[in-house]
Amino acid sequence: MTLSEEDYIKAIYHLGKGENHTVSTNEVAEKMETKPSSVTDMVKKLSEKGLVNYRPYKGVSLTGFGQKMALTLVRKHRLWEVFLVEKLDFSWDEVHEVAEQLEHIKSEKLIDRLDKHLGFPQVDPHGDPIPSKKGEFKKAIKKLLSEVPIGVNGICVGVKDSSAPFLKFLDKNNIALGDTIAVKDKEEFDGSLHIQIKNRDIHISQQIAANLYLKITE
Amino acid sequence: MTLSEEDYIKAIYHLGKGENHTVSTNEVAEKMETKPSSVTDMVKKLSEKGLVNYRPYKGVSLTGFGQKMALTLVRKHRLWEVFLVEKLDFSWDEVHEVAEQLEHIKSEKLIDRLDKHLGFPQVDPHGDPIPSKKGEFKKAIKKLLSEVPIGVNGICVGVKDSSAPFLKFLDKNNIALGDTIAVKDKEEFDGSLHIQIKNRDIHISQQIAANLYLKITE
DNA sequence: ATAAATTTTTAGACAAAACTAAATATTTGT
DNA sequence: ACAAATATTTAGTTTTGTCTAAAAATTTAT
Ligand SMILES: [Mn+2]
Ligand SMILES: [Mn+2]
Ligand SMILES: [Mn+2]
Ligand SMILES: [Mn+2]
């Protein structure tokens, strides 16, 4: 597979929400930042290669083989993201662009060894699950921290309230996107939470918890 | 620069022995495993871009800018090779093919961080020097171990005598290509050497030393 | 010095991946 | 149900990098 074919397969995979929905030419074009006519050309080719099911005017979906390829690419992309953050001290929001290139390196051994070097991580720096070599993985969902049960941990991926006072509070208390958060205990009385964030134990109010999104895998 | 352009620049650099000799179309074609006519096409383009000096029928050499590019690529290639061996436990002879791909990843930050992660290595797993960010580096030369002065260290890169008994000896004494060897002391009497190899101190005869090639940087 | 051998370039073609403009199919709104 | 709006495909180009075959230049050998 060429780099270009790989990026199309990944786009179709992501647009299908990992559930292999049929997606339209226009959707793919928008995601790939290209023209619909280019997409038509490419999906015809991918169809010939047995990677997608394509019905003119009706849309495109991945074949079993195409899904396998997509998961391999997602695995590679996310492992590289972990590498960049964990080993090279990249920040949360800098890794995507570079991983977008690294994911295309062809060497099964490289990925196996990288996986090992990283300690077989289960999620990437954005909280998204890393498919196993066989293509298995748990789905990730986004929840408000206040709705996460005790014992679960996830990654902080967004805020509901983005007002200056709230962001200032987060900053002052050293809570940032990309941080790993574990829910340790919940107070019955006021719904406040005892959480562990980056190996630090802190106590936050229910209002705070109700404005932070966590990505968790079940 | 495209991946293809980069590989041509590297080929011209290596054929020019790092001293920017003018090289012929046919030499480039052979190294790149392509046709001379393709080389002509490409060097014309590289010439337009100011990366090479090209005179029809006379050959091609790198411009100052082209040399800069070549050194950046060599730096990236060799840093990745170190990474593969040191961090991912690849062996000496497996790294080239993968580094050939990784060298094309575009991210200055990635290379700076990788360099740091590896502890700013000076040589790659083949004993070849790694250019600094500014493009400076020491030249490497290949010498018989018996001719290397005391105190110097290098990497074992080949054998002069490749007979079964000699190779068997090396195997039995755990001496392999890719090993780092430092010359600790030399006996006046018989020319035998005390060397350190992979943190092990051993004593070898002059005959052995006269059949092992070391790559050293001065 | 000239012919033969070799190297290099040119001309013309092709495949991959993109684009624009025009044609056609589908969906939406009345 | 039909016209208008939207989505999609087709047709024809372009760019990049490659190739083969033929022409031209250079080098080598007599
Ligand atoms: Mn990509
Ligand atoms: Mn990610
Ligand atoms: Mn390369
Ligand atoms: Mn090397």
Image (tube, coloured by chain):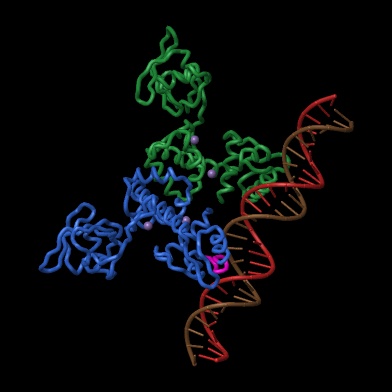
Chain colours: A green, B blue, C red, D brown
From which residue to which does the magenta span run? B34-39
In percent of width and height, residue B168 lies at: 25, 65
Q: Whole-percent x and y of residue D24?
A: 62, 77
Q: Can residue A63 be seen in this view?
A: yes
Where in the image, quadrant-wise, is ligand 4 located? Answer: bottom left
Residue A78 relative to residue C16: left or right: left
User: What is the x, y in percent for residue A42?
Assistant: 65, 48
Which is the main secondary structure of the residues drawn in magenta? helix
Q: Using the rendered image of the protein, determine whether residue A218 is visible from the camera's viewpoint.
A: no
| Residue B40 percent across, percent down from the top left | 56, 67
Residue placed most toward the observer, B193 or B161: B193
Q: In this rendering, would B128 be left or right of B110?
A: left
> What residue is drawn where x is 46% and y is 45%?
B107
Against A217, residue A28 (above or below) is below
Total numbered circles:
0
* A88 shown above or below B172: above
Specify the quadrant of the image occupied by residue B210. Answer: bottom left
Q: In this view, does A66 lie to the left or right of B147?
A: right
Depth check, front residue: B21 or B24: B21
